Image: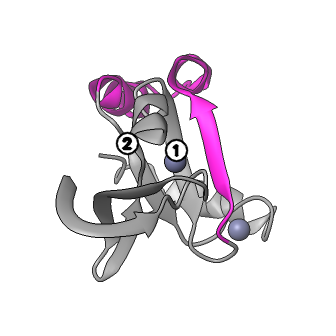
Amino acid sequence: MVEINNKQEKCSICKHEYTSIHTEVQPGVFLYVCDNCLEDAKHNFIWICMSCGKVHMRLKKLVIERIADFELKRAYLICEDMQIIQGIDICIECDPEGILNYMETRKTATC
Ligand SMILES: [Zn+2]
Ligand SMILES: [Zn+2]
């Protein structure tokens, strides 16, 4: 999921460090992630809004604890040890109502 090349780009998450580590979140859309943020991704789920560019970070433990749906919980538990950085089309900041529907429809496509 994470690729490395020689190009240095600004980290998409902290928008501070330069890094060559990147991941393709959607065909043709790359996110750059520095070492620090990659470290954060071990303990947090990281979502980046493709619409406004805002980064949303949630502690994995808290996210998993709050999931009532058994199937979904299992899917997230499988992801617990992985570094998950996902691009989302909309976020709660740019569309507080749309995000709820969006998360519902994405339930099965977490990994
Ligand atoms: Zn960073
Ligand atoms: Zn947004």
Q: How many marks?
A: 2
At numbered mark 1, what does the secondary structure look like: helix, strand or loop?
strand
Residue at 36%, 47% in the rendered image? 110
State ligand 2's quadrant: bottom right
- Ligand 1 within 8 A of label 2's CB? no
Name which of mark 2 and mark 1 comes first in the sequence: 1
Q: Is residue 10 magenta?
A: no
Residue type of the residue flagged with mark 1: Ile
Q: Is residue 53 above or below residue 18?
A: below
Query: In the picture shown, does residue 8 fall above or below 66?
Result: below
For label 1, the residue is 46
Q: Say what secondary structure mark 2 lies in.
A: loop
Q: Amino acid at mark 2?
A: Ile
Image marks 2 and 1: residues in contact by CB distance under 8 Å: yes
User: Crowding at label 2, few (<14), some or many (≥20) Cα neighbours within 10 Å?
Assistant: many
Does the magenta run of residues contain 61? yes
Q: Residue at x 18, y 64 (%)?
A: 5
Q: How is the image coloured?
A: one colour
Q: Which numbered circle lies on residue 19?
A: none
Left or right of 25 on screen, residue 37 = right
> For the point 42% across and 24% down, which residue is it?
70
Give the residue furthest to the bottom. Answer: 28
Report whether 109 appears left or right of 53. left
For the residue pair 23 and 50, the one nearer the viewer reads as 23
Q: Magenta residues?
A: 53-81
Quarter of the figure with residue 90: bottom right
Residue 109, horizontal then vertical, whole percent: 34, 54
Residue 14: image location, x then y, percent: 60, 51
Mark 1 is surrounded, within 10 Å at the Cα level, by few (under 14), some (14 to 19) or many (20 or more) other residues, namely many
Question: In the image, which disc is placed on residue 84?
Answer: 2
Left or right of 5 on screen, residue 53: right
